[in-house]
Amino acid sequence: MAESPGWRAMRSVLWLYRSMTAVVDQELKDGFGLRLIDYQILKQLQLAEGGTCLLGEVARGLVVHATTVSVATERLADRELVTRHAHPTDRRATLVSITDAGREMADEATTALAAADFGLAGLTADQLAALSDVVTRARGARG
């Protein structure tokens, strides 16, 4: 029986994910002492207006549990890469802001990951754009 296109696609995406994250994880760990979630948080805050987000917004943006982001932001705060502070009007909410050191770390890590082709060595710019388009469409179809 022939493999279905869905099975082949799933297997390929999972293989690519594992391959990419192996490269990215190693680069972040060795070069910066960061975990992938740490880098993702720094990038999300770096791109946010004013460099500040609610902790829950960060979690939703990264599609992870708020506890994961809470633990990671505590680790980043210990390194003075982010600050955590109470929301001025909602005592239940925590705001997270990237520091200048965090911005610098995010920039340096991004440069290093770009040099490692973000774990996608061998693909042209057009192929990377096509891959991004296909994955974005698949994500959109999931709602």
Image: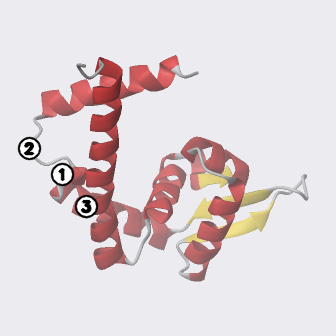
Name the element at disc 3.
helix
**Figure label count:** 3
Name the element at disc 1.
helix
Q: Could you give the CA–CA distance between mark 3 and mark 1, rounded to whole angstroms?
A: 9 Å
Position of residue 116 relative to residue 28, above or below, is above
- The quadrant in which residue 86 appears is bottom right
**Amino acid marked by disc 3:** Val
Position of residue 17 relative to residue 27, above or below, is above
Q: Is residue 35 left or right of residue 62?
A: left
Nearer the N terminus, badge 3 or badge 1?
Answer: 3
Q: Are marks 2 and 3 in contact (CB under 8 Å)?
A: no
Q: In the image, which disc is placed on residue 117?
A: 1
Q: Pointer 1: residues within 10 angstroms few (<14), some, or many (20+)?
A: some
Q: Is residue 40 left or right of residue 70?
A: left
Quadrant where the N terminus is found in the figure: top left
Residue designated by label 3: 23
Q: Are marks 1 and 2 in contact (CB under 8 Å)?
A: yes
**Amino acid marked by disc 2:** Gly
Residue shown at 23% from the left, 19% from the top? 2
- The quadrant in which residue 10 appears is top left
Q: Could you give the CA–CA distance between mark 2 and mark 3, rounded to whole angstroms?
A: 14 Å
**Amino acid marked by disc 1:** Asp
Give the camera-side residue of 62 and 7.
Answer: 7
Residue shown at 35% from the left, 22% from the top? 6
Q: In the image, which disc is placed on residue 122?
A: 2
Name the element at disc 2.
loop
Q: Position of residue 65 (x, y in %)?
A: 67, 52
- The quadrant in which residue 49 appears is top right
Residue shown at 53% from the left, 81% from the top? 79
